[in-house]
Image (spheres, rainbow, N blue to C red):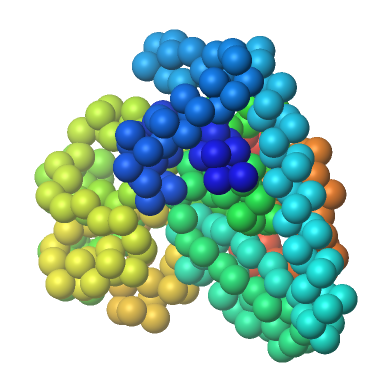
């Protein structure tokens, strides 16, 4: 089963090195797992095309059956746990930075108070890790943006729930606040910026095109917050983080002139039926989201990549 999990991760991520990092394995160990599967099925499962590992016809067949088998085993574990350990249920959810830090914590807390029989785990991880985790059966629900390369696989259901713009955040002592007005695009470009992992996750090429001078990089929103408070660097990220940032003394400087509105929401596997706990949380989250968040983000939900 470990070989199947590793195979699914390589198929979803398309890169052995990144898949090995996600699985906390060495690259040789992961490559050997793929070799053993190919020897077992006496065929090639991947071809390298344009620097990416792509499934062959045999690989696609194995992917479909392996992903379904692993999810069936996950459902069996959940049912055994529910019927054999006093009615307890478990649910694993993954989310991107904005959903994981700004939206879901309060919703998860309220859900667990209402359903103490369900043990909920929320992991905040990147897009590739979320999709690999869904395929491997490690998560039933994922919240965040949907990258074009993941949508193109046809393996996911995506329910848009939020459309939000990006805005520029700065410390209270940033010199641009003394202007008494919104800074121009040229004034913003004259400053140093903080680059965080999820800023342009949906369109990485924009790093090279917008002309900002990035002085530091971070991997999480919380580490970004501390750096913003201590420096005169600017940061661009979703408006949904505004309340979280304000609690740390970091507020909006101006709308971001270089970015567009983005959509995000719920991802599930297209051919997998959700378990009891996942269905309960999905419905709970949608109701809570409508009541507490979505009124801030109006307008038609369109794809912006």
Q: Residue at x 20, y 67 (%)?
A: 227
> In this picture, is 242 found above or below 141?
below
Q: Residue at x 39, y 81 (%)?
A: 247
Left or right, 162 with reference to 79: left
> In this picture, is 118 found above or below 11?
below
Q: x, y (%) of residue 181?
A: 27, 59
Left or right, 207 with reference to 43: left
Q: Residue at x 56, y 27 (%)?
A: 37
Asked whether residue 13 appears in the rendered view, the answer is no
How many dots with numbers?
0
Left or right, 113 with reference to 3: right
Q: Residue at x 47, y 34 (%)?
A: 33
Viewport quadrant of the N terminus: top right
Q: x, y (%) of residue 27?
A: 33, 36
> In this picture, is 282 found above or below 144?
below
Observer-nearest residue: 65 or 280? 65
Asked whether residue 121 appears in the rendered view, the answer is yes
Find residue 94 and report its image quarter.
bottom right
Find residue 220 and report its image quarter.
bottom left
Q: x, y (%) of residue 77?
A: 75, 63
Left or right, 83 with reference to 189: right
Q: x, y (%) of residue 149?
A: 54, 28
């Amino acid at each position: 089963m470990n070989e199947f999990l590793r195979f699914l991760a390589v198929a979803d991520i398309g890169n052995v090195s990144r898949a090995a990092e996600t699985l906390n394995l060495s690259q040789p160990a992961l490559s050997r797992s793929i070799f053993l599967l190919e020897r077992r099925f006496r065929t090639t499962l991947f071809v390298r095309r344009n620097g990416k590992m792509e499934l062959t016809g045999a690989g696609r067949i194995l992917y479909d059956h392996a992903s379904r088998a692993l999810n069936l085993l996950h459902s069996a574990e959940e049912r055994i746990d529910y019927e054999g350990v006093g009615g307890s249920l478990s649910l694993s959810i993954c989310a991107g930075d904005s959903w994981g830090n700004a939206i879901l914590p309060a919703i998860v807390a309220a859900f667990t108070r209402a359903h103490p029989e369900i043990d909920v785990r929320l992991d905040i991880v990147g897009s590739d890790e979320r999709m690999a985790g869904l395929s491997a059966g490690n998560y039933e629900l994922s919240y965040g943006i949907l990258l074009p390369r993941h949508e193109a696989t046809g393996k996911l259901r995506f329910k848009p729930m939020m459309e939000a713009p990006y805005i520029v955040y700065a410390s209270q002592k940033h010199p641009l606040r003394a202007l008494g007005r919104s800074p121009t695009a040229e004034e913003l470009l004259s400053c140093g910026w903080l680059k965080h992992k999820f800023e342009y996750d949906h369109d990485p090429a924009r790093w090279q095109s917008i002309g900002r001078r990035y002085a530091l990089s971070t991997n999480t929103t919380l580490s970004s917050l501390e750096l913003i408070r201590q420096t005169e660097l600017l940061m661009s990220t979703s408006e949904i983080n505004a309340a979280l940032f304000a609690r740390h003394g970091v507020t909006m400087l101006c709308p971001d002139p270089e970015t567009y509105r983005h959509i995000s929401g719920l991802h599930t596997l297209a051919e997998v039926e959700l378990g009891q706990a996942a269905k309960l949380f999905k419905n709970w989250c949608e109701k809570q989201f409508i009541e507490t968040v979505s009124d801030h983000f109006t307008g038609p939900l369109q794809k912006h990549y």
